[in-house]
Image (cartoon, rainbow, N blue to C red):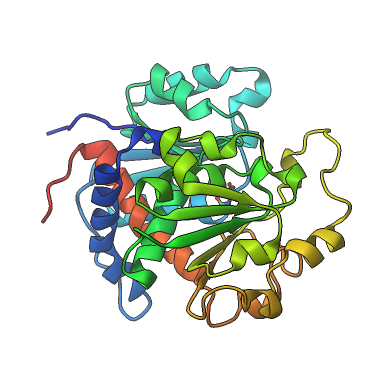
Amino acid sequence: MRGVPRHLVSIADLDAAEIIAILDHGDRYWPSISSAGAEAIQKQTSLRGRTVINLFFENSTRTRTSFELAAKRLSADAINISGSASSTTKGETLVDTARNLDSMHPDAIVVRHAYGGAAAVIAKSVKAAVINAGDGQHEHPTQALLDAATIRRHKGKIDGLEVVIVGDLAHSRVARSNILCLAKLGARIRLCAPRTLVPRGIEEIGGELTRERVRVVHRLEDGLENADVIMMLRVQSERFDGEACRFPNTRELSRTFGLSERTLAYAKPDAIVMHPGPMNRGVEISPQVADGPRAVILQQVSWGVAIRMAVLERAVLGDVPPP
Ligand code: NCD
């Protein structure tokens, strides 16, 4: 029987118990993801006969591939549409495109769009469950969930951890979703960037909760000191959209806010290094750190498949009872 479709538009819509339920659900699929390659994957059959449409209006390597893989590993039919190949280039509105796709009765539509709010608008217009795969500078909820899963795997918990997010906070939907998610799970969050790359009031995005848990610092040493988890962000220059560059030059930014073996020493000796990708090696992160023993960047990508399996099942089947 068809459950109630559940959208996933924003981490703001989830409470801590719902986030933990998704992480636990993703844990069920981790063994098959992490051992993949050793033997053929046993597909789940929970979404057999269901259809997932990936509607991507922005470039993507990890997110799009992992949503497609996740759908296929649950035996759903997965269809990919890229913005440049869709009829929006012929003047059709986003909502019309979504309604037309919905008329073919997909069970879920996964959408990435440059407009902050795109997923919410589509969710109001269609019957399918809508999953936000990144909307402008607003949110990227499944990235935050896979990041939380990765942290939990390595640290055994999230509550009480010191997490620092370093880099272009001004244009980062990943940072916004992570701030909300990690604060709800009890972490303390430091945001570290030059003043020009920190949006005013960012520590207030989750109201009282984030006001208490988030601190902004403007020196890398202050950001890294005693950190358990370091998340590095790329400079998202494609989102600058005609605005003046907010830092003197890339080399200067890299010198003052780049993570290198030298600056990593400020963090705890067992701190893990994360990055949502795509990385700009030699800018926000040195190759030695990116490929070093503390980096869990490729494991984040692997977790993306397990978490998106959980998110798709939740979206299409509603509450999924534990096995
Ligand atoms: C990010 C995105 O697109 O928001 N990447 C991702 O989905 N893993 C971050 C980025 O583009 O820098």
User: In the picture, residue 251 is in which quadrant?
Assistant: bottom right
Q: Is residue 131 visible?
A: no
Q: Position of residue 230 (x, y in %)?
A: 55, 65
User: Could you say where residue 93 lies in the image, as x and y percent from the top left?
Assistant: 58, 17
Which residue is found at the position 89% from the left and 51% from the top?
Answer: 248
List x then y, in percent, for residue 270: 47, 79
- Name the residue: 33% across, 37% down: 14
Compared across the picture, whether 77 is left or right of 138 comes to left
* Quarter of the rendering occupied by the C terminus: bottom left
Please determine whether, in this image, residue 115 is positioned above or below residue 46: above
Closer to us: 272 or 227:
227
Q: Which one is in front, 292 or 156?
A: 156
Residue 26 drawn at (x, y percent) = 29, 57
Say which quarter of the image contains residue 203.
top right
Task: Look at the picture and state if 127 lies above or below 143.
Answer: above
Is residue 269 something that shows in the picture? yes
Q: Residue at coordinates 44% horizontally, 57% vertically from top-left?
A: 147
Above or below 224: residue 185: above
Residues 244 and 208: in front is 208
- Look at the image and tell me in which quarter the N terminus lies: top left
In the picture, measured across the screen, residue 285 lies left or right of residue 66, that is right
State the residue lying farthest toward the right: 248
Q: Please indicate whether residue 281 sits to the left or right of residue 87 in the image.
A: right
